Image (spheres, coloured by chain):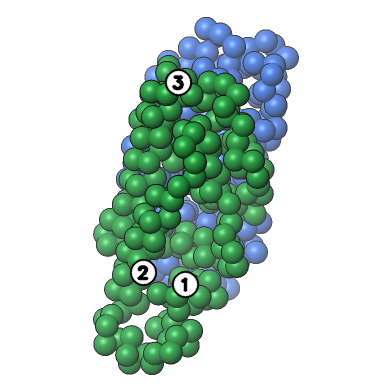
Chain colours: A green, B blue
Amino acid sequence: MGATYRALCKHGYASLRMQDIADESTKSKAALHYHYESKHDLLVAFLEHLYEQFEDDIGADCGDDPATRLVTFVEERLTPRGDGQKEFQTALLEIKAQAPYDEAYRERLAEFDRLVFDRLRSMLQTGIDRGVVDDEIDPEDTAAFLVEHINGAQIRHVTVDASLGAARNRLRTYLTEQVLTGSEAAGSGE
Amino acid sequence: MGATYRALCKHGYASLRMQDIADESTKSKAALHYHYESKHDLLVAFLEHLYEQFEDDIGADCGDDPATRLVTFVEERLTPRGDGQKEFQTALLEIKAQAPYDEAYRERLAEFDRLVFDRLRSMLQTGIDRGVVDDEIDPEDTAAFLVEHINGAQIRHVTVDASLGAARNRLRTYLTEQVLTGSEAAGSGE
């Protein structure tokens, strides 16, 4: 899975060959083919692996205050992590662009979308219950709005090289001014 | 250009061949190759053609009230037009996903992005001047926020089949509640 990540960063999705993945690993191309019939099957397994990692990651504790947790969660979606992040986002966008033609990709991507949506909705509901999120917002609508927005900021960063930091600031402003109720929304301190 | 549109809707971008475009037109593949050296060159010309059309279209008159003009403009970005719209958006997403690897695509897509951004910024400024847009918003930041959001709603519609109508309603609510000042923001009447 690590080799697949590195190969995607280096070659992108469209021109990726099983040999490129083998070159990044200690396994031969034949050994890869023993486990995965095609590049497609390997990438579906890779998306499943990413999903599991992502599920573990976003369960990670980021404090008890629901306003800070919400802001941190949203900002993390728009914060590059480590080397090759932009290259990887680029390859992931290629996979997203194939999703309409490919049910297995589409199902995996829908799982990611659903997970982020569910987390946001539940954080917004907790925030309303604790009085730090404006109780006039609809948690479902606002969660969907945030998922759309995160998607758009990512794609705009990758396709026309728009600043991810500026997008993060704009979305933080949206959260503090339109979603959160008060000064609890001081942001993640970064 | 019409043949390219139809061929993209039918075959998508990745598997598109010059022959597929010739099949949709009255020209032979050889005739296409006479004008365009490769599929890439033809698609760059196609993006330029789309841009010119788009520039004409979005100059179209939609009334004098700046609030209605803003809401209409934003909603039109999230309203399917005619047959094959989703298929075409899908093919366009494939081209967007290639942009990081392809300067000619990237430049053309950046022109679209810039045009939408400039129009939004100028409509927001006019709205502030005429008192229908909240003068506490920054036209530049809000225009960028809207461009990101439109991108995200489009990609989510194409990749995980999220409802475009629901996204349009959410964005209209954002405009009427957070950007426009009052009841002038009655929407486009659809």
The picture quadrant where one finds residue B123 is: top right
User: Alpha carbon of mark 3 to alpha carbon of mark 1: how far?
Assistant: 41 Å
Relative vertical location of residue B29 with respect to residue A133 in this rendering, above or below:
below
Q: Give the spatial CA distance, label 2 vs label 3.
A: 40 Å
* Contact, mark 2 vs mark 1 (Cβ under 8 Å): yes
Type of amino acid at the residue the image marks with label 2: Phe
Q: Secondary structure at mark 3?
A: loop
Q: Quadrant of residue A187?
A: top right
B133 vs A70, left or right, is right
Left or right: B31 as drawn, with respect to A55: right
Q: Position of residue B124 (x, y in %)?
A: 66, 23
Q: Looking at this view, name the residue that lies furthest to the right.
A: B129
Chain letter of mark 3 equals A
Q: Amino acid at mark 3?
A: Gly
Dot 3 alpha-carbon crowd within 10 angstroms: few under 14, some 14 to 19, many 20 or more = some
Residue drawn at (32%, 90%) of the image: A31
Residue for badge 3? A131
Query: What numbered label is drawn on residue A5?
Result: 1
